[in-house]
Amino acid sequence: MLDALFNPRTVAIVGATPKEGKVGNTLLRNLLSFRGDVFAVNPKYDEIMGVRCFRSLREIPHVDLVVIAVPAPAVLEVIEECAALNIENVVVISAGFRESGKEGASLESELTRICRENSINLVGPNCLGIISTHVNLNATFSKVMPSAGRIALLSQSGALILAIIDWALHQKIGFSKVVSLGNKAVLDECDFMEYLAGDDQTDVIAIYLESIERGRRFMRIASRIEKPIVILKSGKTSTGARAASSHTGALAGSREVFESAMQQCGAVSAETLEELFDYIRILPVMKDVEHIAIITNSGGPGVLAADAVETYGLSLASFRNETLQNLRKILPAEANIYNPVDILGDADASKLMKVIEIVISDKNVDAAIVILTPTAPMNMEEAAEAVLKYASFSKIITCFIGGESVERAAERVEREGIPNFIDPARAVRAISVAKAYGRKRSRLNIRQFAVERDHTRKLLQSLPEGIIGVEGFPVIESYGVRVAPYRIVRTGDEAVSAASEIGLPVALKIISPDIVHKSDVGCIKLNVSSEEDVASAFYEIISNAERYTRMISGVLVQKMISGGREVIIGMKRDMQFGPVIMFGLGGIFVEIFRDISFRIAPLSVEDAYKMMAETKSYRVLRGVRGEKGCDIDAIAEVLMRISQLCMDFPEIMEIDINPVKVFERGKGCVAVDFRMVLRR
């Protein structure tokens, strides 16, 4: 679909100009090296920089790609001309659209309508442009052209593209495609990811985004792509859209949702530009590694690397006896033959080569880091050649530490696709990402529970919009979630009768949308063990509640559940990614300890168990120091049932089940409190 966008035969620039410093001038100058035909469009000129200039697109026999650099109000006329000529690929450089205010937003809306109705692939508006290095296409106003390479770069910031290209030229890193997404009026990151998945010139996709509008589509596409995707997203800590009506709404912020989504779809999330650069360099050459060998001529950096191995969740490889014996033969007695291997400061490149050969031949080694400082005996350029001799059939990266003394050696290995790092810890951190990459989410093992959707729909229709408390218990019960026996009462006599029917002792809790933390305001009583105390507790709770609100629906009388561990299960509906399921330590401390994990629904069986395993409290749930473990399987089932409920009913915006009491293995779990937000 987008092949002609990146591999056009003819390109026309609308708004080309001979005036230096203007965008239209830079665009035309950049396109002079394009391998196809270039045309300029400007009614004021017949020729610009030796390129024939036309009054309009209608005068050009055939155009595959149109690049527009005219004022925003004139763009629509050009787009309509493209539609009339059946031109399918357009890049709008011009600013002055949605980013400029109400009038600009109206212009962009009309621009989008015309493009969609005429199947025009629009990049932008308000963008830097696009680059396709393998055909020398530089349809941007960048001052420089990046080198050809195997990395595709998508960015919502044109300025960041300029910085990355400049950095990449210095680092000898090349790109296959570069796309400035701009306002994403028609084409967005999802469209380009789909195209790049099948692009033979691209091995890794790097993305910088400020927003993801189609989060679930992003996840579907990313999970199918076999190529590494590294994404740096700004705005992950925004709290403006957080709901305050539930624990889940307060805890499932932008960062948590985004990180969970990326983890599930197999994309790598970078926190900084430095990490983005590191990851796009290492992922094309290294995946699924864990057991690391360190080879160094300096003890200090080797120790730093060993510390980082543990910090980032990797392991130092345990050498086989044969490896140790071979190392002992060529290294002096004072050298360390165990991992990290310290070949000492008097070692030369010849000795280094022999050590590399021995270490990478060990089947216990997944990857090796060669860490060198510029000692007098070590010729760094010869050391680079030693690394390259074995890099073609083993996973090796380098850490040549220094300045001018190591510069040429570092450039040599980088030129051959081996990442070089100045800091051992950065090298190990990058490898840790390579360890995790590639474990794409399996969507095959999603359980579907037999439920009565029609009954649940009627229950939801009977409830008002807004915050729903324990009166919504029947909703989760209809989806197979076990609830502690309860009754909702409105008088003291009803409370006593309910307690007698349920069986003492009981708990009493206020039912009010205005009171979230009941214990803070004296609106909950636990372990009430006599009928007299039930009546007294009822009136006390009502009296305390009336100090804060008149919105009182009644009092919950519930069987007092003793024993078990308390966990929380919740859901928040994210605007981009849909239902986000939460699991964590429950009770009153959930917001303090934040021992929580998230997944985007629908949950697979694996998702449910991994959510639990990611929390610190998981060890307690499994049982420690002779204590019996909790019913992990029952928790997983509740997580999946809530996931199914939220997928089936989009009007459910939030859910909190806190606490869920979990008992010993085989004895299940039971919901004790409940809160839900409905929007129709």
Image: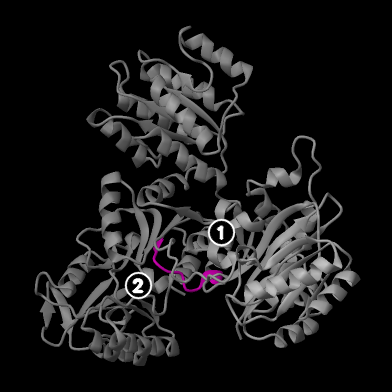
Say the numbered circle drawn on residue 8. 2
Q: Is residue 183 visible?
A: yes
Q: Position of residue 89 (x, y in %)?
A: 37, 79
Image: magenta residue range:
208-217
Q: Give the residue at x 22% y 88%.
A: 56
Query: In this figure, which residue is indicated by the disc labeled 1?
Result: 260
Q: Position of residue 484 (x, y in %)?
A: 81, 66
- Foreground mark, 2 or 1, reads 1
Amino acid on which the number 2 mark rests in the picture: Pro
Labels 2 and 1: the sequence-earlier one: 2
Q: Give the residue at x 9% y 70%.
A: 20
Is residue 198 shown left or right of residue 206? right
Q: Is residue 476 visible?
A: no
Q: Residues within 10 Å of mark 2 (few under 14, many from 20)?
A: many
Q: Position of residue 382 (x, y in %)?
A: 33, 25
**Residue 567: quadrant of the picture:** bottom right
Tally the numbered discs: 2
C-alpha separation, residue under disc 2 versus residue under disc 1:
38 Å
